[in-house]
Image (cartoon, rainbow, N blue to C red):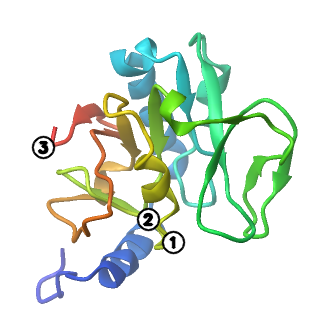
Amino acid sequence: SQAGAEIPTTKPEWREWAKQRRASLDWESTSSAIRRGLLDWEGLAAARTVLIYLPMAEENNIKPLVESALECRWLTTRTPRTGQVLTVHELGGPLEVHPYGYLQPHQSAPEVHPFDVDAFLVPGLTFDLWGNRLGWGAGFYDRLLAMARPDAPLVGIVPADLVVDLLPADVHDVPMTHLATEEGVVETARR
């Protein structure tokens, strides 16, 4: 950090900090390293049903995992046009473009209950060592992850440059059990 620079304290300040840091990252190389780490991680190898995200710009692209040799059922989220609840759907059928510009399963894709997911691979702007996640602020993932099985790993996908010591967290925020960076997959301090 720069001498004299203010350390962020609020969620909006941390979001701004993360957005500035993200602009200079090499997403292709960090994505490739994160995918290799996930393929080496026993937690992913053991999962039968895995929720993955379809990346937006300036997010790690882990979608090539779907073409890996892993024997699992791949799922992803669908964001409603209105309302506050992400739904989980099988990946592999037709996709459509959400009004915000990212791809998601067509509404006809079979829906899966979050309790049936064995591992969640979760995007975010920044994460801390305790597993706290800061997203874009709509709370979609927190509501979804609150419905996960207690034993399902929640893996924050994040470049190491965006892992900080401690983020502000609210009671409804769902912490990650693991972080996947280009250095590998590790349990969070909360775990």
Give the residue at mark 2: 135
In the image: residue 149, left or right of residue 7: right
Q: Nearer the viewer, residue 26 or 150?
A: 150
Give the residue at mark 3: 189
Where residue 3 appears, x then y in whole percent? Answer: 12, 84
Q: Which mark is residue 173?
A: none
In the image: residue 101, left or right of residue 164: right
Give the residue at mark 1: 138
**Residue 56 quadrant:** bottom right
Q: CA distance from mark 3 to mark 1?
A: 25 Å
Label 1 element class: loop
Q: CA distance from mark 3 to mark 2?
A: 19 Å
Disc 1 to disc 2: CB gap under 8 Å: yes
How many marks on residues?
3
Where residue 179 appears, x then y in whole percent? Answer: 31, 41
Crowd around label 2: few <14 · some 14–19 · many ≥20 (10 Å):
some
Q: Amino acid at mark 3?
A: Ala
Select label 3 or label 1 by which is in front: 1
Where residue 149 appears, x then y in whole percent? Answer: 39, 33
**Residue 37 quadrant:** top left
**Residue 90, above or below 12:** above
In the image: residue 6, left or right of residue 48: left
